[in-house]
Every structure is written in C-alpha cells, then in structure tokens.
Image (tube, grey):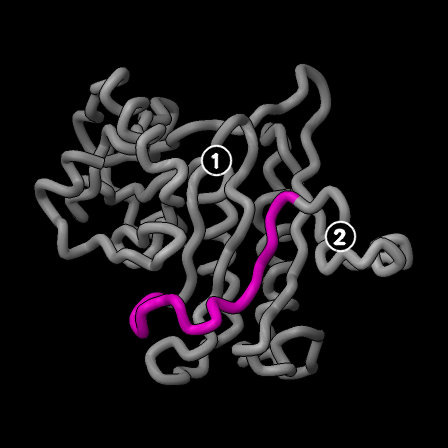
C-alpha cells in the first residue's frame, strides 16, 4: 500500500469501516497493516502487464471448494433488483448473479472452486439469522457509502477465505440504468476479486504491486488484455 499511497493518494477514500482504492477495491482497516507487512516481505513487482493474483483461498487436495453466495440486496436497491423479471435488456442484479456464477466462473474445469447461490431456509429463520448459515460472500446495497462514480466494490481474500461481501451502488451515476451485460460484467469482476484476482492493467492504473501483492500468472500472455474482465 505504501507505493499506492505515495503515487496516488487521491485514489484512496476512507469509508469509515474500510478504504476504497481505485473506485473498486475494498480493504478493511483491520486488514490494512497485514497487507503492508505482507507486501513488504514479498517486495516483488511484475515486469509487465498480464493477469495477476494476490492472496489465495484454501481449497481441498481433491475436488473443489464450494463458495456460497447470498444476495441480500438492501433498502437502497429497488425492490425489482431482488427477484427475476422478464426484462432481458435491463435485467436484475439478482438474475445476473446467476449468470456470472454459472455461465462464467463455474465453466472453468480446472478451477478449484465453485460458486453456489444460497437462500434463507426455515432453520435460518428459526435461528433469527438474516444471512444463511455458512455463507461466504454477501451481496448487498451500499446504503449510500460508495462514491457516485463507483458501481460496485469488493476486497481480497484473507486467512485462506474469500472476501466476505460485494457492495452495489444503488444510485450509481445518479441512478443510471445499467444493462444486463453491465451488471453481469461487474459481478464477474467482483467475484473474481473476492477470490484473489487483480486488475490486468494495474500498472497503467498506477496501482501498488506490493501492497497487496500482485503475483503474475505466468501462463497468461505478457501483454495488456483489453478484453479481460479484470481490465
């Protein structure tokens, strides 16, 4: 984070419970010093643009790990965003979450994780839980915390677990109506961030490569990928 602070302090915003970096990345204040220390120990920088990852999540030796995702919505998101509707152009965040998980992330056979959407059960309700037991990632409205120009945000894994929430701006650009594809693209991006992927164009964006660390994925092309969901 030190490099990021030195070069682009204006791109860091204090949201109270966390820092918002580059209008996209959430870093909780509790994890801030851990990122600093981890980056200082690694102290390595990728030489060029490619795909990158930061900390990773724990997965089993055989099979895969199921990441449970719950769409909670929120009072600042229109009620229509919480269920399936027939409008295919301006589809709901709830519906596009399914596409982001099933038609994108869960299609990769070598990925050691699978995303699964969960809903509240009778047992959850009887236990007065507002979030299903075992949920890994909660998707909810930002309740006015995100800047007007940020559509959604999430953080990076810690302690072998994915980042636990994705927040959606209920009034992005003063209520701009997003298409189904735009919502799906953003959810694919934020889900990937929760499991450790970083921006492919992070050097062009002058993001820190050490805090949190940016580890190159050497199997990917050593070039800028204009069509990457992480660009």
Q: Which residues are magenta?
A: 136-150
Residue at image coords 42%, 79%? 171
Q: Is residue 28 rendered magenta in the image?
A: no
The residue indicated by pointer 2 is: 132
Residue 228 in view here: no
Quarter of the image holding residue 145? bottom left
Q: Earlier in the sequence, mark 1 or mark 2?
A: 2
Dominant secondary structure (helix, strand or loop) of the stretch shown in magenta: loop
Q: Is residue 148 rendered magenta in the image?
A: yes
Q: Quadrant of the N terminus?
A: top left
Mark 1–mark 2 Cα distance, whole angstroms, equals: 20 Å
What kind of element bears circle 1? Answer: loop
Residue at image coords 44%, 36%? 196
Q: Nearer the viewer, residue 91 or 174?
A: 174
Relative to 116, residue 88 above or below: below
Q: Nearer the viewer, residue 181 or 37?
A: 37
Q: Taking 224 as reference, is 206 left or right?
A: left
Residue at image coords 61%, 76%? 81
**Residue 39 x/y as whole percent:** 27, 24
Residue 200 in view here: yes
The residue indicated by pointer 1 is: 157
Quarter of the image holding residue 92? bottom right
């Amino acid at each position: 984070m030190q490099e990021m602070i030195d070069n682009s302090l204006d791109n860091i915003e204090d949201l109270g419970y966390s820092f918002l970096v580059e209008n996209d990345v959430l870093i909780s204040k509790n994890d801030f010093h851990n990122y600093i220390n981890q980056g200082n120990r690694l102290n390595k920088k990728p030489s060029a643009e490619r795909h990158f990852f930061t900390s990773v999540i724990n997965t089993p030796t055989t099979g895969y790990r199921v990441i449970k995702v719950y769409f909670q919505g929120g009072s600042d998101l229109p009620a229509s965003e919480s269920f399936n509707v027939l409008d295919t152009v301006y589809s709901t965040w709830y519906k596009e979450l399914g596409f982001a998980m099933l038609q994108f992330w869960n299609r990769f056979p070598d990925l050691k994780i699978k995303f699964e959407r969960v809903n509240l059960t009778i047992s959850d309700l009887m236990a007065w839980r507002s979030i299903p037991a075992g949920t890994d990632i909660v998707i909810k409205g930002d309740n006015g915390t995100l800047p007007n120009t940020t559509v959604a945000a999430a953080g990076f894994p810690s302690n072998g677990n994915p980042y636990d929430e994705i927040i959606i701006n209920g009034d992005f650009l003063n209520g701009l109506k997003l298409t189904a594809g735009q919502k799906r693209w953003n959810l694919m991006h934020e889900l990937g961030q929760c499991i450790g992927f970083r921006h492919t164009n992070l050097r062009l964006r002058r993001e820190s490569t050490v805090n949190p660390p940016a580890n190159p994925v050497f199997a990917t092309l050593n070039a800028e990928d204009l069509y990457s969901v992480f660009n």
